[in-house]
Amino acid sequence: MNAPLRFTLAVLAGLVTAVLLIAGIEFMGHRIYPPPADLDISNIEQFAAFVNELPVGALLIVIAAWLTATFIGGLVACVIAGSRPMLVAGIIGAVLLFASIGNLLMIAHPKWFSLSAFIGIVASTFLAGRVGAMWQRREG
């Protein structure tokens, strides 16, 4: 397989992995901390009020979802790409960071959550790239 195609497929696989992980982990979080039956997620004000009332445990699950998805999605992309691990992990991390920033701008979250998400996603991206580089050296 040629390198550009492999790189593109690696990024797509990493993003799909990340999205599935976020959905799965957040789904489990909703099982532990179920939203009210009458919650209308299309109503931004109502949803923002719901987020502001969430217990810390529920917010920690969301952070765990974002950080796990960033790391595993980046690592999957690194393994498939076979080269340039920091770049490919960085692409996954950048997409997830921009998505989380969009989420944080649309719906106010506690400051500790926003700061943790930003720092954690950057750190998870870097860690995925480093572990991916070790993997590539071992396989190469």
Image (spheres, helix red, strand yellow):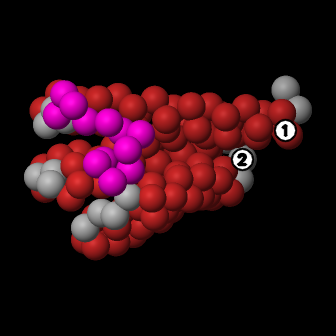
Mark 2 to mark 1: distance in Å? Answer: 9 Å
Residue 42, x across and y down, in percent: 41, 40
Q: Residues within 10 Å of mark 2 (few under 14, many from 20)?
A: some
Residue 91, x across and y down, in percent: 65, 53
Whether residue 15 can be seen here: yes
Quadrant showing the N terminus: top right
The residue positioned 21% from the left and 58% from the top of the image is 52
Q: Using the image, determine if residue 61 lies above or below residue 94.
A: above
Q: Using the image, determine if residue 30 lies above or below residue 120.
A: above
Residue 108, x across and y down, in percent: 34, 64
The residue positioned 61% from the left and 43% from the top of the image is 78
Q: Which residues are magenta?
A: 36-47
The residue that mark 2 highlights is: 83
Q: Residues within 10 Å of mark 1 (few under 14, many from 20)?
A: few
The residue that mark 1 highlights is: 3
Residue 113, x across and y down, in percent: 28, 64
Q: Judge by depth and name the residue closer to the eye, 45 or 106.
A: 45
